[in-house]
Amino acid sequence: SGALRTLAQYLTRIANDFRLLSSGPSTGLDGIRLPDVQPGSSIMPGKVNPVLAEMLNMAMFQVMGNDLTVMLSGQAGQLELNVMMPVMAYNLFQSMDIIINSVNAFTEKCVVGLKANAEKANGWLAKNAILVTALNPVIGYLKGAEVAKEAMASNRTVREVVIEKGYLDEEEADRLLNVRALTDGGIQKYPVLPFVCERVPHAAALLFSLSG
């Protein structure tokens, strides 16, 4: 029962992520588009509600409640006798049925038809000031903070501001702000180091001494 509860917690988190990422389309994240499984919202015509994610939430809440019953029943025995076994077995088997059916429905009617809204996601990412962190080794913290503040204040991208100010040319900005390279797994080869060595006096010698 405890293992099923842990699984239910993970599935709840996944469902919550689906609900958040699909929020919108006008005032939410709108990073993903969920398949239509009903005519629309009962309040707003045409709106696509994340009903399968909400279903998974409710189903997993029931599983967590069942686990509480099993836990309380387990501690309700005396010595080597526990007369609560029937409700423990009932809730355990019910939890397994709920998880199997809800996960199958969520997979077939929601996950399979999921579509990424690449345009909106790229737009959010391009205007995310956190990207300036990748430029710190090259332009420095103070200039990075200046770029981030101006980008947010003017509703522009970090790339646009850093090029406009002349801190980087287009080629350097594209290389350093390559999100694919920044987020790939494994140990990176630190593409910023050549730029640091070119721009900061004695940086190459310092890095060599540290690596030795």
Image: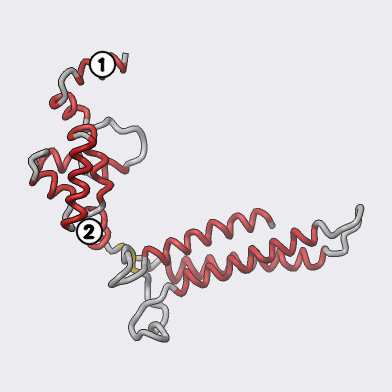
Question: Residue flagged by tag 1: what amino acid is it?
Answer: Phe
Secondary structure beneath dot 2 equals helix
Q: Is residue 47 left or right of residue 158?
A: right
Which residue does the numbered mark 2 point to in the structure image?
123
Q: Is residue 182 above or below residue 12?
A: above
- Give the camera-side residue of 49 and 90: 49
The residue sitting at 47% across, 65% down in the picture is 107
Q: Position of residue 119 (x, y in %)?
A: 22, 62
Classify residue 111 by image quadrant: bottom left
Q: Position of residue 50 (x, y in %)?
A: 42, 72
Q: Are marks 2 and 1 in contact (CB under 8 Å)?
A: no
Number of numbered discs on residues: 2
Classify residue 152 by image quadrant: bottom left
Secondary structure beneath dot 1 equals helix
Q: Is residue 89 above or below residue 179?
A: below
Which residue does the numbered mark 1 point to in the structure image?
208
- Mark 2 vs mark 1: which is more N-terminal? 2
User: Alpha carbon of mark 2 to alpha carbon of mark 1: how far?
Assistant: 39 Å
Question: Residue flagged by tag 2: what amino acid is it?
Answer: Gly
Q: Is residue 94 left or right of residue 176?
A: right
Q: Is residue 204 above or below residue 174?
A: above
Q: Is residue 30 left or right of residue 89?
A: left
Binning the other alpha carbons within 10 Å of mark 2 as few (below 14), some (14 to 19) or many (20 upward) gives: few
The residue sitting at 82% across, 63% down in the picture is 85
